[in-house]
Amino acid sequence: MMLHPAVPADAGVPSADATFRRAAWRFMPLLFVCYVVAYLDRVNVGFAKLQMLNDLHFSEAVYGLGAGLFFVGYFFFEVPSNLLLHRLGARSWIARIMITWAVLSFATAWVDSPLMFYVVRFFLGVAEAGFFPGMILYLTYWFPSHRRGRMVAVLMAGNPVSGMVGGPLSGAIMHAFAGTLGHAGWQWLFIIEAMPAIVLGVVVYFFLDDRVADAAWLSDEEKAHIAREISEDAVVRTHGSVKAVFASPRVYLLCLILFGIIMGSYAIGFWQPTIIRNSGVRDPLMVGFLTVIPYTCALISMQLVGRSADRLRERRWHVSGPALIAAAGFCLCAFSGDQLFPAMVGLTLATVGVISALPMFWALPTSFLGGTGAAAGIALINSTGNLAGFVSPAVIGWLKTETHTLSSGLYLVAGTLTLSALLILRFLPARLVNH
């Protein structure tokens, strides 16, 4: 008689790794594309600037203030927006955000005065408030902290990909459509690049699942895998209420750290085309192609850093190290003058450092924020930190107007990045964030 080996009780049940991999492939590509479009619509004004300042007779200071006012609207509506997402669900709220920001980005094509520019940029920030922290919050519903570093890196790869795609695309639109139907190239830039957000908003509404329990494409065993790891991860979280978040010095420390990193992010986003043009490249199309180099390097770097952080379960040096590299890059940009090669090396270091630091930063607050506290805390940190998106272009624009050079502003940004790195290493204990 032939004996058959006993069949394990869990035979045929998918492993936890396979389950989380399936979840990632289900919605991460969609979130990634949404982030690409969001970042493109947020910073394409940096390319439009190459033409619109002359057409509208705006000074560098007017441009810097208008670019930064986005983040004032963003600041005031970020926390309530994220709390509404937590209550109403990501599916409907992210769709609403994308469609309303697309309408306002489209409207930017018809600004004709500083006041109109300021108003549209402010309300664009109001419309987009809650988008990025909402997606970070959404990832906490699906991935425990030791799996989330790579997912955040995948999501935020939308930043460099937006630069890789958006640079040549924006340059090509401004080059090819100038004068078409009586509109300038920079106007067509806003018109064309607003359209994908409307389409994606509809896709999000019909495709995204609010919670693991809503996912009909997962088996009961797979849902149990995810729920168990999320539950185990939640044990270490100490800030589960809105009151605990607003009373926590640690949360405000993270606001300050993110502020310094974001200063660098938007120095790149809003001034990279200007730095390249100042090095002697005049054609917007060529400027666009050159921006691909730093973003391509950053895309590779951020994935490697994300994998390393999850493998080693170490977070502090994976944020502070890239921040210091970015600081060195900005100093090189400031020192390069009108020389293209050192300017591109500096931009590459700055872009690699900032873009690698940002996704790793979000492992810090999500290591101790949970529940409603996570919704409020992530939004508070993101909105306060993103005030640097107002300060960075406004201050750099003012300094450039006063000194006729970008150098002083770039040195300032290098200083804020260095300060953020030192604050992480000095005040955030490894036992808190390394798990």
Image (tube, rainbow, N blue to C red):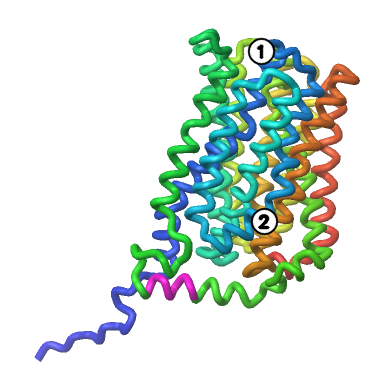
Identify the disc placed on residue 281: 1
Decide which of 337, 254 is in the foreground and name it. 254
Q: Position of residue 59 (x, y in %)?
A: 79, 17
Q: Residue at point 57% right, 58% down?
A: 85
Q: Mark 2 or mark 1, which has the lower sequence index?
A: 2
Decide which of 50, 72 is in the foreground and name it. 72
State the residue position of label 2. 80
Q: Is residue 415 left or right of residue 34?
A: right
Q: Residue at point 83% right, 44% down?
A: 418
Q: Is residue 405 left or right of residue 83?
A: right
Q: Is residue 346 visible?
A: no
Note whether 57 is above or below 125 in the view shown: above
Q: Is residue 77 visible?
A: yes
Q: Position of residue 385 (x, y in %)?
A: 75, 48
- Per the rendered image, the range of residues in magenta is 221-227
Question: Amino acid under label 2?
Answer: Pro
Q: Position of residue 301 (x, y in %)?
A: 60, 42
Decide which of 158, 138 is in the foreground and name it. 138
Identify the disc placed on residue 6: none
Q: Secondary structure at mark 1?
A: loop
Is the residue under label 1 in contact with that under label 2 (CB below 8 Å)? no
Q: The C terminus appears in which quarter of the rendering?
A: bottom right
**Residue 225 covered by magenta stretch:** yes
Q: Secondary structure at mark 2?
A: helix
